[in-house]
Image: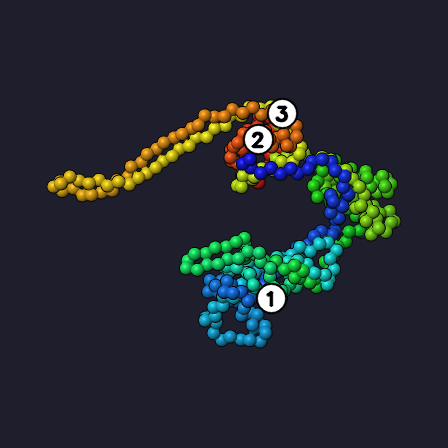
Amino acid sequence: MAAVFCAATARADSTTIDQLVTVAGAPTNQLYGYGLVVGLPGTGDQTTEVPYTQQSILNMLRNMGISLPNVTSMQPNDVASVMVTAEVPAFAHAGQRVDVTVSAVGNAASLAGGVLLPTPMRGGNGVVYAQAQGPLLVSGFASSAGGTSTSVNVPTVGSLPGGAILANTIPADYAVNGLSALLLDTPSFQTAQQIADVINASYGGGTATAASPGEVDLAAQGLNPMRFMAGVLSLPITPPAQAPTIIVDAQSGTIVMNAGVTLGPAVVSHGDLTVNIQTTTGVSQPGPLSNGSTVAVQNTAVSAKQPKADVINLPRAATLQDVAAALNAVGATPSDLIAIIEALKQAGAINGTIKVI
């Protein structure tokens, strides 16, 4: 088959509430920082072209009591400017370690073999919450010589597992005066009301209220907030089945469908038109004693070929496997298959919402 089909389950499988929601007041927090990676084997920034790397080196040396009177000759190639980012889970406390990602912001060719110098990491409010440092893990590599270069994966991005230590606890307040809220990861009228009903069935009416498709408000009613929230999040629930959805990535030619997609009877005609243009260069030679000159001429030949279109009858397909088998029978390229699916949608022969990414 020309395209890739991945089946995302659409069955109403039983799960727990904590798989569907995020506790309000305790979100995942993002940290960032600017730092330097040193010890690179000649693959760092070209400081003459990346002035902020040179300035960062000077600032670092100045903070260590080293002053350079003449910096015009400074051209290190073993240092790179990087941005350091991390996601801190909710309720993380000072002293805990988090993973960080390090990305080059200059013209460094690779960060492999480098060591991140101590880098303070800030939150969106500008407060420093962590500090990262350590040797980088880089999965890719880059090499060049004689004007030829090669690379594997992305050598300008590395990681530091547990490379940052939280210096401050990020505030998280999930219960105020016994009141809290659950935020749905995927807003839905049905799911929000179902969550409220499940909680009320276990803790009594009025404990949970579906305030909107994306929020369920909770009242602990004098219970211990920690114990109450742990019990609520562990309650089993069977969410509604997913709506039939078709995801189309036109750039890569990938098509993703969930199990709710079905196909009605349809007829598809598929054929290709190929136009071939060839240009050859010839020589026009004048006759003897004609006082002419030899010139180059271009000869162009155009040919077109359109094979006989294949008319394929697509039967009704009630399962995702049947849909994949029917579309496989068309034998189209990824781009053609995307067009066929869109045409089937317009004809009402395939159910599901098409989303193009």
Tell me, for residue 327, which label it has, or none.
2
286 relative to 345 in the view: left or right = left
Nearer-N-terminus badge (3/2): 3
Q: Amino acid at mark 3?
A: Arg
State the SS at label 1: strand
Q: Can you identify the residue that label 1 sits on? A: 117
Question: Horizontal and vertical percent for residue 297?
Answer: 26, 40
Question: Horizontal and vertical percent for residue 140?
Answer: 55, 56
Q: Residues within 10 Å of mark 1 (few under 14, many from 20)?
A: some
Q: CA distance from mark 2 to mark 1?
A: 54 Å
298 relative to 314 in the view: left or right = left
Q: Amino acid at mark 2?
A: Leu
Pointer 3 with pointer 2, Cβ within 8 A? no
Nearer-N-terminus badge (1/3): 1
The quadrant in which residue 6 appears is top right
The colour scheme used to paint the residues is rainbow
Residue ID at (42%, 32%): 274
Question: Horizontal and vertical percent for residue 347?
Answer: 57, 25
Q: CA distance from mark 3 to mark 2?
A: 12 Å
Q: CA distance from mark 1 to mark 3?
A: 62 Å
Question: Horizontal and vertical percent for residue 99?
Answer: 66, 58
227 relative to 317 in the view: left or right = right
Residue ID at (31%, 36%): 300
Residue ID at (16%, 42%): 292
Q: Is residue 31 visible?
A: no
Tell me, for residue 316, which label it has, or none.
3
Q: Is residue 8 visible?
A: yes
Q: Amino acid at mark 1?
A: Leu
